[in-house]
Image (cartoon, rainbow, N blue to C red):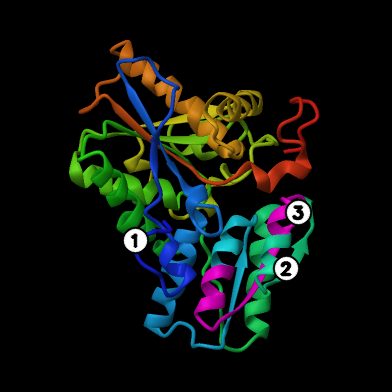
Amino acid sequence: MTTHEHPLSSVLETVGETPLVAIDVGPPSVDVYAKLETFNPGASVKDRIGRYMLEAMLDRGEIDPGGTVIEPTAGNTGIGLAIAAQQLDLNAIFVVPERFSQEKQQLMRALGARVENTPTEAEMSGAVDRAHELADEIENSVVPQQFANPLNTEAHYATTGPEIYGALDGAVGAVVVGCGTAGTLMGIANYAREQNGDTHICAVEPEGSMYGSLLDGAPEHEEYKIEGIGTSDATTNELFDPTLVDTIEQVSDRDAHTELKRLAREEGHLVGSSAGAVSHAARTVANRIDRGELSVPHQTIVTVFPDTSERYLSKGIYGSFEEWDG
């Protein structure tokens, strides 16, 4: 996080150390806190993996300075990678399904990256295929592949988890975090379980997503508006470890939309639909703890607000639910 105490040499030094802020979603007996990842320079949690992954890949010799990073992404990872690439003497190409936020794509281009769109109907798997095709064509290039690269999880184990536990002096009872690539949740969960094996770990996904099928079966995939979390095929999300997850909370588009608007109106948080979803899920978990249905080591829940609503204004995120083009 940007500090006023001394000057910094690069924007990369402002990544991480984001605020942990109380949110009013639970009964008085349970404290709920959200990590505000909009305080990163690219305004999302993906700035963390952008810096961590590229620095590690350069150190390992997987790519040399002057090379090209190619990533299939819905946008925030592209922004985080673009910021890091710019500072680390790397080029960047991002493959983005057409339906995703135009704001994110504009920002990637503003940061000097090339953006290539793939058809919406090909979903993220089509973007992944195209990214690897480009890597085969371009010398000194690499596909970090956030959906499968353990560095994604390591970034949050090394930074996000310790920051949360440091801020709360270790008093964390439950972790309630959205699942897209699963890197954020898995990194925090691994760290949490090392601190206290009884910590409750809850993954959050939209209704219609398929992570739930890995734990206790789930309906077939259905389309959803919530952006940034969820999966149409959980087998492609290689970072997700079901043994680390106690429960999966599915949240409807309508509930996420209602909550993201409430967060802005009542608490001053300008956040995207994934934050609306995890806030709604945190309320559900808090109520279970309050009713004695869930035993946790501390009456405290932590979640992560991944990004800002400004990325989705063109989709009518603050309009009516019917007008919202998720």
What secondary structure is found at the residue carrying circle 3?
Answer: helix
Q: Residue at x 64, y 57 (%)?
A: 75
Q: CA distance from mark 3 to mark 1?
A: 36 Å
Q: Is residue 27 visible?
A: yes
- Asked if marks 3 and 1 touch (Cβ < 8 Å), the reply is no
Q: Amino acid at mark 2?
A: Val
Picture disc at residue 115: 2
Q: Amino acid at mark 3?
A: Gln
Is residue 148 in view from this perspective? Answer: no
Q: Is residue 225 above or below residue 123?
A: above
In the drawing, what numbered circle is on residue 102? 3
- Toward the viewer: 267 or 88? 267
- Residue 26 on the magenta span: no
Task: Where is residue 315? Give x, y as percent.
Answer: 77, 41
Query: Between disc 2 and disc 3, whose residue precedes?
Result: 3
The residue to which callout 1 is attached is 5
Instruction: Please give the name of the residue rendered at 35% of the width and 51% of the height, measured from the top-left corner.
Output: 160
Placement of the N terminus among the 4 image quadrants: bottom left
Q: What whole-number distance in Å separates the C-alpha atoms at marks 2 and 1?
A: 37 Å
Question: What is the x, y in percent for residue 118?
Answer: 76, 61
In this picture, which residue range is highlighted in magenta?
Answer: 82-105
Q: Quadrant of residue 218?
A: top right
Q: Closer to the N terminus: mark 3 or mark 1?
A: 1
Q: Is residue 63 above or below residue 306?
A: below
